[in-house]
Amino acid sequence: MPAERVPELDSPDPAPAHAFGLRLDEDLALRLSERHHAASLHRRIVAEREHLSGAFGWAREASAASLLERIVNALEQFRRGDGWHADLCWRGQPIGAVWLHMLQAAGGSTEVGYWLAEAFERRGLMTRALQGLQRHFFEGRGLGRVAIAVDPRNDDSARLARRLGYRSEAVLRRVHLGTDRLPADLAFYGLLREEWEAAGGPGSGAARVGPLPLPRFALHVDDELSLALLERDDAPALSALVEANRAHLLPWMPWAADTAPRATLDFIERRALPAIAAADGFEVGLWWRGSLVGSAGVHSLQRSSRSASLGYWLAAEAQGRGIVTRAMSALIDKAFLDHGLERIDIRADAQNARSRAVAERLGFPYEGILRREYWNGRSYVDLAVYSLMRSEWRPGGLHGLRATTSMRSSR
């Protein structure tokens, strides 16, 4: 049965449009599994049930509810920083899955699990996928070892591990339930960082990742710009960027007063990672031509009214290139598509001409001024409010009608 088809927009990334994708090579990418992917994952598992049940006992009885629970648990792993679950995608369509049983800190290990749709087997796709992931593990995460555990009776998986250069390490006896529901052995194969480097390192299956210096989960906007989910490893670079732009940011953003790495890490651990895990919006770093130049996110998500707000900031030296406008357009598309929103708004200090100009360029109609609505660290200030309704949204471009009351005439 053919794999699920996902519409693609003009993007350098082989992940489906609007996905947080981790590029593996020119054709293959991982799409971080989010809650709204559960139904399509269930359809794929049902279509592949006979094929998968020989290797995975859970596939035999997998339901929409159990797969949603699987995704929720994996997102909690992502929040903790010890794993994830992702759809394996080929040219924009999901054809399998890859997940981590654990993910340790730099110098440690991870264990990879995977499955591939029957129609896509014997094409070398999983070999290419795991080769591409090795750069993410060894360079991006600084791991010392990657492991694959297989049932010794699964000859295909054992051959794949050996083909990738993984060495046989141990057979643990009766440590898991096999597909026959009886205790079964697990054969572990491992690849060390130094073995990967000796075999060619990044030149062996490495992917061109466009604006990102290393492969990671990101919305790829174009050849210059990617929006990568904020993770703990971003705290030092993000903190340094805020510190360098403190004078530029502080008039509008009181949080810029504390540029310590600990404050940035707190934001990532207490807001950014919990948000993506709970489907409560998301936070991304703006990567332009390989450099981190700002941050943006979908905030204040209200499920009852199906509304949310956009927030963003950009380093002073990166302004004037259309970066924020392009980034916000991508975030708007994802928010409407994946969160089922009816309204997105942008709220800016009434005196912040640059932020208000972004809302106008995006075609957000102007709604008015909320007086003394926001404490900016020194005083209560007025907020200008712009909004976009689902009925006004146009995917991939400017939206709605231009505001009938311009920013200039509103002041």
Image (tube, rainbow, N blue to C red):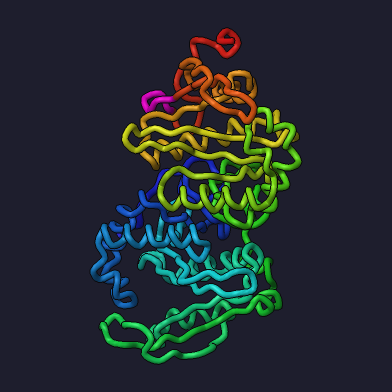
- Residue 310 lies in the magenta-colored region: no
Which one is in front, 354 or 6?
354
The answer to which image quadrant residue 128 occupies is bottom right
Q: Position of residue 326 (x, y in %)?
A: 58, 33
Q: Position of residue 317 (x, y in %)?
A: 75, 35
Is residue 154 shown above or below 411? below
Q: Which residues are magenta?
A: 388-393
Which one is in front, 358 or 203?
358
Is residue 385 shown above or below 13? above
Question: Residue at horizontal 36%, vertical 90%?
Answer: 174
Question: Residue at horizontal 42%, vertical 44%?
Answer: 280
Horizontal arrangement in the rendering, residue 113 relative to residue 56 (left or right): right
Q: Quadrant of the N terminus?
A: bottom left
Q: Position of residue 120 (x, y in %)?
A: 41, 65
Question: Residue at horizontal 37%, vertical 59%?
Answer: 71
Question: Residue at horizontal 46%, vertical 16%?
Answer: 367
Is residue 115 shown above or below 13? below
Say if residue 402 shows up in the picture.
Answer: no
Q: Position of residue 212 (x, y in %)?
A: 65, 51
Tally of marks = 0
